[in-house]
Image (cartoon, rainbow, N blue to C red):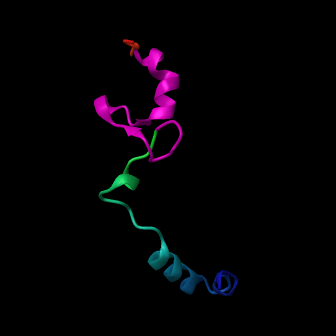
Amino acid sequence: MHTQLKHKPVKWKKYQKHNKPKDRTCGRARFKCKITGTSRGLIRKYGLDICRHAFREVAKELGFRKLR
């Protein structure tokens, strides 16, 4: 279908307008990790917005220290 529409620029623009993914306003998919881009295991406290995997790598650089 895409190859048929590419030869018709007006219809292609209309197709893209109505079939693009919507911007999320709520839910898990709204926030993504700044480092890896995943939305799973996200730590948002203190405005970090990084996943737990990336946090373990950069925690010392951010000033966190392990208590145990």
Comparing 52 with 1, the one in front is 52
Image-quadrant location for residue 43: top left
- Give 18 or 55, whichever is nearer the viewer: 55
Judge whether 49 appears above or below 40 on screen.
Answer: above
Give the x, y percent position of residue 30: 37, 53
- The percent coordinates of residue 67 (x first, y second) are 36, 12
Residue stretch in magenta: 34-63
Relative vertical location of residue 28 with respect to residue 51 in this rendering, above or below = below
- At x 36%, y 60%, the residue is 24
Q: In the shown orientation, is residue 45 left or right of residue 11?
A: left
Q: Residue at x 40, y 55 (%)?
A: 29
Residue that appears at 49% across and 82% down? 14
Q: Quadrant of the N terminus?
A: bottom right
In this view, the residue in front, 40 or 44, is: 40
Q: At 49% from the left edge and 22% from the top edge, which residue is drawn?
A: 58
Count all numbered tags in the image, as a single digit.
Answer: 0
- Can you say whether 64 is above or below 15 in the image? above
Q: Is residue 49 left or right of residue 54?
A: left
Q: Quadrant of residue 8?
A: bottom right
Location of the C terminus (image quadrant): top left
Q: Nearer the viewer, residue 27 or 68?
A: 68
Q: Does residue 67 appear to the left or right of 21 in the view shown?
A: left
